Amino acid sequence: MKDKLKNIFKGGLGQLTIPIIAILLLIIFNLIRDPSFFRITVELNNDGNKVLAGNLISIINAASELAILAMGMTLVTAASGGQDISVGAMAAIAGSAFVKVLKSGGSINGLLVIVAFLVAVLVAMLFGAFNGTLVSVFKIQPMIATLILFTCGRSIAYWINGGATPTVDSGIVKAIGGFIPGCPIPTPVIIVIAMAVIFTLVFHFTSLELFTQSVGINGSAARLNGINATWIKLLSFIILGACVAVAGTIGVSRLGLINHETLLLDVEMDTILAVAIGGNSLGGGKFKMAGSILGAYVIHILTVTLYAMKVPSTDVKAYKAIVIIILVVIGSPVIKKWFAKTVARIKNNKSKVPVKGAQ
Amino acid sequence: MENKKTFRREPLTDTQLLMIIAICIFVAMYLGAMLFLGGGFLRAQQVFDMLNDNAPLIIVSCGLTIVMIGGGIDISVGAVTSLVVMSCALFLNNGGNIYLSMLLALGIGLAFGLVQGYLISYLEIQPFIVTLAGMFFARGMTTILSVNPQKVNTEGTENLVELLTSKDPAQKISFIQFLRDMNFKTLLEGKIKIDWLGYTAPNGNRIPVRMEWGVVIALLCVIVIFLLLQYHKLGRGFYAIGGNQTSALMLGINVKRTRFLSYVICGLLSGIAGYVFLMHTGAGNATNAAGMEMNAIAASIIGGTLLSGGVGNVAGTLVGVLTLTTIKKIVVTSGLKDPWWQSITTGGMLCFFIILQSIVLSVRAKLRAKQKKG
């Protein structure tokens, strides 16, 4: 038992060390600054439901889209060794498709919402397949391939709804972006948990994780071992497409309207950041999805902390950058090596000191 | 001896081939626009307008090309440019000296280059994350400096270029006097007029071609970097570390230092680009140069630079910038006024270029493999 504990402290956490330390530091910092920062209260919302409220709940709730996108991005990063920078634009397309279908029928009922969601997923998966084909078949670096959709994606979203920003007024859509009546937990959080469970089950019952890692570490070696590297890369982009559709749907449901210009704006950079903070190599290979999810929460705790300190929303980026740099410098291989060396030297000195004293 | 016999130098390297393709497509596109759209495309001013508007983009893209040849990426360039514009505008408005403002621009760019280069090459942190943080920092600093647009004050000062080139001996000033009295209005409104390229307006007035000083700086940057990449040891080092890092190390190239210098040069060029941007617009704004990093990446790609490193050329990048602008101009002049068309056509064009390059390179690789066998 003692050994086990020791192992955990000795780096058994592995790549999760950095995000967990970051979360702990931020929580401690907030508790010192304002002890009631993380207080959770039960409040009645406008619809008369008892719901949980407080900074912690709003952080977890607001990070939902980012966490979902980070799950998909982890797979893409691991398989292709590159990142998809078109997720924000793709989410705008998926959201536009979702609203377009909702608006096409007369009254919005449960069936129509499901159909609209499935259409959004299909559309996003198609665009994901487009990116994936460029990357896997044409062997183009992911960042370049997705630059195409990054450039024109929001224009396509604009074109789907004819330039308008239609609003959707429906209880079901509101429930997706807010609270299900009778349930105190925000729905986006439930969706994140559901997605995490789905990914865990998929990794448990299929060899997707193993195959993705082997393609990412060495594509040609994986191919020689009978893994279809092209298909795995393509699949990772299609899965990311599905994640993007879910995130886009949540984003649209939160506001009850689709604004192709501002829906999940600049989310691609935050997503890649979440993957990196989670300790995953951006060059592909081994990955831990839990790390990316934690990374997404780190980013949002940081943002909410800065807001709570009355930093204007336009200036938040500068402070965020400083924290990011500190995190990545601590996590950099050179610093880690130097740290290990120093620790070893101190330990050696310690073992020598008593010997000297005895003489 | 046998090795020497079988080794045959290819007539064109990948770099040259991709550049030639880019130039051919650009020329074809421009000729097509001249033939079918006419109008402004028939005048030389059109090309110079494109250069005037895009001088900062050209400079930034040159820096990015160097980084990309070295196998890295720098997405902070647009934000650094914006920060430089804003800080120089504030500096000049608060009574700063014009020469010191230039030094300030270079200093900011250099500082970003040094820090990012150090973190990337010596601490081995992924370039995307470092420059992403740099981008966030620069954008945040810009809004911290000022959220409101800052127009640089140019009241009451005369245009010294006209005095310098004036033929009237009473008005003419010496070059030293010019340097002493130089002010921002000189930079903002001073234009080089080329008479023989101009055209005669219907009312009989001769309208010369106007070129801004920024274009001269941009073209100088292109030439200097072209020479650096082609003939200097450091420039060849960029290709070496981008092509194969291990081989470069074995050849005795200081890989870390070379990579560090690529980011330093890129940062410096962002600083220069910021100043040129200010010379073009005359005002600092928090949304300046928004999305410039992606435009610069797109321009480099169209010009034949590969993100994987080792292949690329700044002359191609210049063509890339012109190609991007020409597409936008063509869309506007051909009457597609809806706002979505510009970015959709740009995206389509990018897609075309990227797939074309991929096909060309894979065909070449296959031919090479065949030659080796045969």
Image (tube, coloured by chain):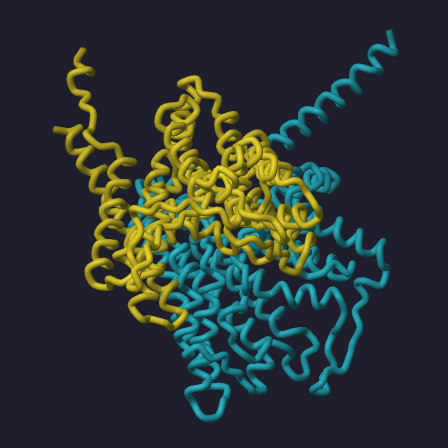
The chain drawn in yellow is: B
In the rendering, at what x and y percent does residue B4 appear? 19, 15
In this orientation, which residue lies closer to the viewer: B188 or A9? B188
**Looking at the figure, which quarter contains the N terminus of chain B?**
top left
Q: Please name the color used to draw chain A.
A: cyan
In the rendering, at what x and y percent does residue A222 appear? 36, 42
In the rendering, at what x and y percent does residue B62 appear? 43, 40
- The residue depicted at 71 percent of the width and 48 percent of the height is B94
Say if A84 sits above or below A342 in the image: below
- The image quarter in which residue B149 lies: bottom right
- Count of numbered tags: 0
- The image quarter in which residue A163 lies: bottom left
Q: Is residue A331 visible?
A: no
- The residue depicted at 86 percent of the width and 59 percent of the height is A35
- The residue depicted at 67 percent of the width and 50 percent of the height is B93
Say if A339 sits above or below A17 in the image: above
- The residue depicted at 29 percent of the width and 68 percent of the height is B334
**Looking at the figure, which quarter contains the C terminus of chain B?**
top left
Q: Is residue B77 visible?
A: yes
